[in-house]
């Protein structure tokens, strides 16, 4: 199979950037298909740390082509900043991807301040940009090819949304950058289709995580796109049969940023220790992430939704500091035991997690090179996760560096 999709199975921030980066040199194409610069994928390359928000992770490999797919909402300002150290000729932007403008960001920030139901968004304008798209008044990247038509469309959009925005000043400021990217705005569905037919290897890079999916996550505390491989065919413009193998990324515990239900959340000193050790601060917003135990109920929900057939467990080394490890295996809800995720956020907030507890290993594991190097308790934890989820664990990330990644053998 020459395609692979990478998907976060929790609330985003599972460490997809590192896994994608470790694998992306094996691929000819890396394709982002949803979201925008709300994502934050941290990669280390050429001795440098890059936090990529809008660019696919393959950009750090000079021979990889990087696609910004149709399902994305693209901020030109964010793209301009991020592309600086890289080569523009290594990207292709879908002519059908929607553009995200500074006023979308303002609307996002305002609605977070004024609405009674705060979502805790990244305030990057993602929700408002998708709203513009689904209201069928959006502007797509292809419009940048004709600046006078683009100006008319942008003026109309500004008037329809009733926002203060100086179209002329924006165009003046972005003119040179727009001219530089126009040659790379293309029908990316055609490009990826051709690449597939030629036997090229294609990696689909998901942003956020399944529990932030607009439909299948903890609505309304979700993002406005579908971070599941099921959306790739539509978001890239490909037949579903092109998307089969999927690698699910699972952090060894759970984190979440923003508001919303989090049944296994922990507080106080225990949470602080994990936050500090795992550097659990948003890579896009810097917000401290909320911390919790591993939640198998949510993971089973996410696995069912995505059909992932292999897993990577990340940040396992962080759990070296805890005495015991809890896994939530079911919820108690209205006096009943359930292994389904209730659809209403308030109900999910009211479930009581049912845990099983395993001993910790209390020893550093960052230097382990193979599964058998890991302490027995860590191996047991991984085996237990695999038993609960019914999907083989292929990779274990035991530190932030590229080489701190264990690929499991068949007999581990
Ligand atoms: P939005 O995507 O900015 O609209 O934010 C909606 C929700 O998704 C908020 O809870 C954000 O914190 C969360 N979110 C968006 N992008 C990411 C991400 O890349 N990692 C983790 N959480 C995210």
Image (cartoon, rainbow, N blue to C red):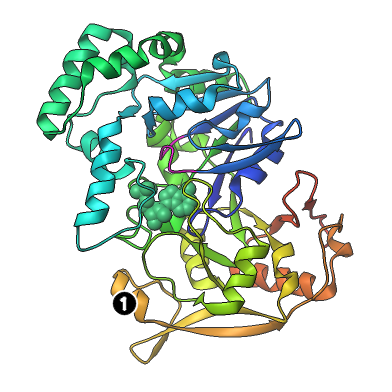
Q: Which quadrant of the view contains residue 43? A: top right
User: Assess mark 1: CB under 8 A from ligand 1?
Assistant: no
Q: Residues within 10 Å of mark 1 (few under 14, many from 20)?
A: few
Pointer 1 residue: 347
**Can you give x and y, in whole percent of width and height, for residue 323 in the image?**
72, 81
**Position of residue 329 in the picture relative to residue 115 (left or right):** right
> Which segment did they paint magenta?
33-39
Task: Residue 219: name its quadrant.
Answer: bottom left
Please state the horizontal and vertical placement of residue 94, each as a whole percent of the image.
40, 22
Between 4 and 181, the one lying in front of the other is: 181
The residue positioned farthest toward the bottom in the image shown: 335
Q: Magenta-highlighted stretch: main secondary structure?
A: loop
On the question of residue 215 being in view, the answer is yes
Q: Nearer the viewer, residue 12 or 80?
A: 80
Which quarter of the figure is the N terminus placed in?
Answer: top right
Total marks shown come to: 1
Q: Is residue 378 left or right of residue 310?
A: right
Residue in view at x 53 percent, y 63 percent: 255
Relative to 44, is 212 above or below?
A: below
Q: Is residue 130 visible?
A: no
Identity of the residue drawn at 66% across and 67% down: 386
The kind of secondary structure element at disc 1 is helix
Residue at 31% over, 70% down: 345
Residue 25 inside the magenta-drawn segment: no
- Compare residues 123 and 11 and report the one nearer the observer: 123
In this rendering, the answer to whether 274 lies above or below 74 is: below
Q: Residue at x 83, y 72 (%)?
A: 363
**Residue 18 % position (x, y):** 66, 45
**Percent coordinates x, y for residue 97 in the rendering:** 35, 27
In this rendering, is residue 153 above or below 380?
above
């Amino acid at each position: 199979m020459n395609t692979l999709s990478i998907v976060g199975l929790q609330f985003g921030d599972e460490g997809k950037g590192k896994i994608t980066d470790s694998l992306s040199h094996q691929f000819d194409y890396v394709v982002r298909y949803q979201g925008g610069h709300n994502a934050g994928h941290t990669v280390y390359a050429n001795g440098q740390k890059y936090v990529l928000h809008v660019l696919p992770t393959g950009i750090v490999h000079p021979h990889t082509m990087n696609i910004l797919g149709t399902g994305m909402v693209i901020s030109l300002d964010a793209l301009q900043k991020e592309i600086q150290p890289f080569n523009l000729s290594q990207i292709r932007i879908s002519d059908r991807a929607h553009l995200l403008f500074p006023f979308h960001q303002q609307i996002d920030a305002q609605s977070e301040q004024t609405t009674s139901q705060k979502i805790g968004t990244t305030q990057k304008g993602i929700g408002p940009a998708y709203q513009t798209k689904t209201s069928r008044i959006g502007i797509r990247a292809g419009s940048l090819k004709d600046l006078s038509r683009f100006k008319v469309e942008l003026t109309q959009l500004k008037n329809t949304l009733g926002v203060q925005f100086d179209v002329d000043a924006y165009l003046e400021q972005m003119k040179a950058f727009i001219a530089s990217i126009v040659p790379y705005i293309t029908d990316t569905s055609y490009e990826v289709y051709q690449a597939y037919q030629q036997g090229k290897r294609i990696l689909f890079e998901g942003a956020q995580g399944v529990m932030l999916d607009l439909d299948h996550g903890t609505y309304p505390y979700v993002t406005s796109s579908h971070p599941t491989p099921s959306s790739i065919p539509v978001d890239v413009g490909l037949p579903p049969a092109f998307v089969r193998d999927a690698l699910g990324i699972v952090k060894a515990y759970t984190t979440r940023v923003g508001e919303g239900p989090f049944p296994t959340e922990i507080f106080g000193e225990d949470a602080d220790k994990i936050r500090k050790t795992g550097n659990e601060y948003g890579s896009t917003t810097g917000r401290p992430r909320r911390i919790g135990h591993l939640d198998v109920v949510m993971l089973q929900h996410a696995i069912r939704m995505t059909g992932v057939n292999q897993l990577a467990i990340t940040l396992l080394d962080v759990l070296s500091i805890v005495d015991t490890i809890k896994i939530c295996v079911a919820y108690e809800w209205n006096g009943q035991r359930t292994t389904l995720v209730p659809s209403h956020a308030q109900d999910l907030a009211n479930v009581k997690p049912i845990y099983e507890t395993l001993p910790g290993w209390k020893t550093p594991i960052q230097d382990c090179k193979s599964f058998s190097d890991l302490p027995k308790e860590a191996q047991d934890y991984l085996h237990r996760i695999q038993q609960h989820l019914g999907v083989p664990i292929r990779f274990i990330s035991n530190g932030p560096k590229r080489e701190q990644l264990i690929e499991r053998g068949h007999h581990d």
